[in-house]
Every structure is written in C-alpha cells, then in structure tokens.
Amino acid sequence: MTYFLGIETSCDETAAAVFTDDLTVLSSVIASQTDLHARFGGVVPEIASRAHLRNLLPVIDEALSRAGIGTADIGCVAVHNTPGLVGALLVGVSAAKMLSLGLGVPLVAVNHVASHIFACRLAAGRDIYPCLGLVVSGGHTALFRCDNALSMDLVGGTRDDAAGEAFDKVAAILGLGFPGGPAVEREAAAGDPKAYAFPRAFLDDARLEFSFSGLKTAVLYACHGQNVAKAIPPPAGQKRADLAASFQAAVVDVLVTKCKQALRKTSLARLAVGGGVSANKGLRSALEAMCEKEGAELFIPPLSLCTDNAAMAALAVEKWKRSKFATPDLDAEPNFL
C-alpha cells in the first residue's frame, strides 16, 4: 500500500489529507480562513497567502497524526498547482516540492477543478466515468465532458461572474456577510422564491453558457433602485428574505437547465457536481429531480468534499498509476489548465 499526502492551498482554505492508492481517505484536515476575510467581504489574496504560510505545516502534521503515519511512510506527494490565487498556490507547491525532494518520493501535480469532479468518485466508491461534470464555486462555473478521471473537455462556462461569486456579491448587497453562499441560503429559507422575477440569462438559449452579472445587478436595483445617490442600508425582514429566495431560485434554475441541456447534447447519462455551491440544498434537490426525469445518474459528494479540501487531490492516484509525475521545476499556474 502506498500512502499519499495531498496538499491544497488554492484559495483561502489550508488543507492536507492522507489517502492510499486504493482511494481510502485516512485523514482530511482543513484550516479555514473565513474569519480573516469576513471583514473585507471576500478573499484578500495577500492575507490568504500569509495564512497558508502559518497554517500549512501544522495542518500537514495533524493530517499525518490522524492517519497514524509519519513522514517516512509517505510514498507520494500530491498538490493542487492550478487554478487559483498564484501566491496561495505557491505556498502549497513549494511545500510539496520540498517534501518530495527531501523524502525522495514522486511528486504529482493535480488540477483543482478536476479534483472537484473526482470528489464525486471518492464519495461514490466506484467508477463514475464517463460523465458530465459541473464545477460550481466561487471561482468557477463550468461544464465538462469527462471520459475518464484525467480527461476534461470544456463544453460550457460563464461569461462573467461565477455562481459562487454572485452569491458573495448578493450577500454583501443584502448585508448578510461572508461567505455569501451559506448566508443567502439561510436567509432564503424564510423567503418567497417567486417574489421577484429576476433574470435567468441564457435559460432558453441552446448555448451552454452562464452569466450571473446581470442577476446580481437586478438584485441591487431591487434593493436600492437604479439611481442611488448615497449609501442606503441593506433591506431587512421579509423583503430581504424574499430577495435572497428569488435570487437563489434564479441561480438554481439556470444551473439545472444548463445541466439538462448538456446531458442531452452530450448523450451522457451521469452528472457529477462539485464545488462549494454544490452544498446548496435547493440546488441538490433540483438536480436530483431533473436527473430522475432525464434518467440520468447524479453524483454529488457530501458537504465535507464540496468545499476546497485536500482529500479530493486523490485524483493524483490516477496519475501515479500512469507514472505521470511532476518535475522539480513545477510552478503554480493561476489560470485554468
């Protein structure tokens, strides 16, 4: 049995995990930076990078301890090196290269977005490929044709904001704080999703594209009007709940509709969904209903594997089996590869 150490520092979660070559996850440790960024209403790259520097080695130590192994037992080091915040990625990549060199074990570079889809494979405990993959998070909203774990062909993406980014921005408009996804979902629970007829971009368009910028603006106008001369306090009470519910319904409608279109266009019968927004209960329920009607199999990981984590870096096992190792000059790549 080979023990893998996985490292994740692509954004604002410092994470490490230990897993084996049969995809058994022995530990998964995450140090959240939410409190550090909450006052700014979003992730500040420099703060994130510095927090990774402080947290990474203790997180790795904790992951090894929980797995019951030491550094001498590590047989391979895996790291998410793309995409993400370049400074944050560099912390993880540098640590991974140091450990690989010092321990004399292979280094595997893993695509963070592909790992979100592979999280579905981890949770299912069986093969899920070929499948349609939807990655929906703060940084990404994209559809992929995945013929196997290492194959990702983009079939559709967002023109502007990612869905998670829109949740964060709307949460700020409504005075709900950061992170926006959970905050909006909680507020929406008491609201009427039909109270506001917010736009659903490309809903009836055959193109597999997303756009959430106009939806965000529509929420802003519904709150404050189109000619705001000065700062106005965010809405409260039932109005805020209705705004949150109507916004969330619009996002869910678009995501589910585009998944349905993509399933039909690609003739795939499996849908794998990953990323932080996939934790949204309304989205999960709507996707389940759609897939049941379409005769498609739905894979969504548990909440612990939806948000950024290092366990999903177990995708590295697939590259390790094929001897697809990284070289010592591995670099962080902030853009999607």
Image: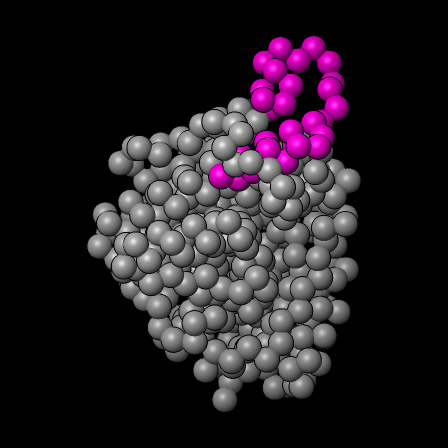
The vertical placement of 195 against 118, above or below, is above
Q: Which residues are magenta?
A: 220-249
Picture coordinates of residue 131, whole percent (x, y): 32, 60
The answer to whether one can see residue 104 in this image is no
Residue 246 on the magenta segment = yes
Residue at image coords 62%, 76% = 27
The answer to whether one can see residue 222 in this image is yes
Q: Nearer the viewer, residue 2 or 192?
A: 192
What kind of colouring is applied to the model shown?
A: one colour
Picture coordinates of residue 98, whole percent (x, y): 63, 69
Q: Nearer the viewer, residue 1 or 39?
A: 39
Picture coordinates of residue 284, whole percent (x, y): 47, 54
Q: Nearer the viewer, residue 210 or 193?
A: 193
Q: Magenta stretch: dominant SS?
A: helix
Residue at image coords 26%, 36% = 206
Task: Please tell me in which quadrant of the rendered image residue 189 appears.
Answer: top right
Residue at image coords 35%, 34% = 203
The vertical placement of 162 against 219, above or below, is below
Picture coordinates of residue 19, whole percent (x, y): 55, 78
- Indicate left or right for 184 with 196 as reference: right
The image shows a total of numbered marks equal to: 0
Residue 16 on the magenta segment = no
- Indicate left or right for 323 with 26 as reference: left
Residue at image coords 23%, 47% = 265
| Residue located farthest toward the bottom when viewing the structure as drawn | 1
The vertical placement of 243 against 35, above or below, is above
- Indicate left or right for 70 with 194 as reference: right
Task: Please tell me in which quadrant of the rendered image residue 190 appears.
Answer: top right
